[in-house]
Amino acid sequence: MLKLPVLFEHYREHRVAQADMGFWEYVSLHYFSGITYDADYACDMQLPFKSISLVYVFLFALQPPVEAAWALTLPDDVTDKSDLPPVLGILLSPYLGTPAQPPEA
């Protein structure tokens, strides 16, 4: 996308040399006719998608060493489960274990 102005500027240069050249003829000349080593070859290689320009992006994932020992310690008030509400058996469907049950009539 950054090279689009170069494309149109080069097209304008071709229009000065050949006034009857249309834009699609210009695109066909530069992209579908093979490589021509002429006087403006260096300008042609500046056009978008004419040369490979790689942009490298390095992504790292920082991870702890394999031998690192991780221990999660919770406060005592969190480990006390007496505050938690009991699971009510009436809320659980008897059909949860068999998902292919047909609906009741």
Image (cartoon, grey):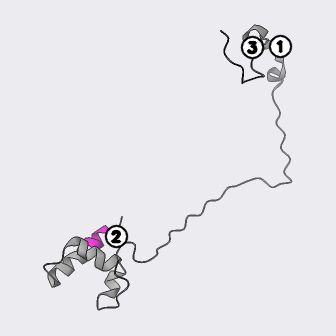
| Most foreground residue, 97 or 91 | 97
For label 2, count other residues whose C-alpha is less than 10 Å away and answer few (under 14), some (14-19) or many (20+). few
| Most foreground residue, 79 or 96 | 96
Residue occupied by mark 1:
82
N-terminal-most mark, 3 or 2: 2
Single out the mark in the foreground, 1 or 3.
3
Question: In what element is the residue under mark 1?
Answer: helix
Asked if residue 78 lies in the magenta stretch, the reply is no
Residue occupied by mark 2:
3
Segment colored magenta = 1-8
Q: Position of residue 14 (x, y in %)?
A: 20, 81
Q: Is residue 71 above or below residue 89?
A: below
Residue most extreme to the left: 19
CA gap, disc 2 and disc 1: 67 Å
The kind of residue tagged 3 is Leu
Which of the 4 image quarters holds residue 104?
top right
CA gap, disc 1 and disc 3: 22 Å
- Classify the position of the N terminus by image quarter: bottom left
| Most foreground residue, 18 or 82 | 18
Residue occupied by mark 3:
92
For label 1, count other residues whose C-alpha is less than 10 Å away and answer few (under 14), some (14-19) or many (20+). few
> How many labels sit on residues?
3
Q: Position of residue 59 (x, y in %)?
A: 61, 60
Residue most extreme to the front: 105
N-terminal-most mark, 1 or 3: 1
Q: Would you say the magenta stretch is mainly helix, strand or loop?
A: helix
Asked if residue 4 lies in the magenta stretch, the reply is yes
Left or right of 15? Residue 103 is: right
Which of the 4 image quarters holds residue 48?
bottom left
The kind of residue tagged 2 is Lys
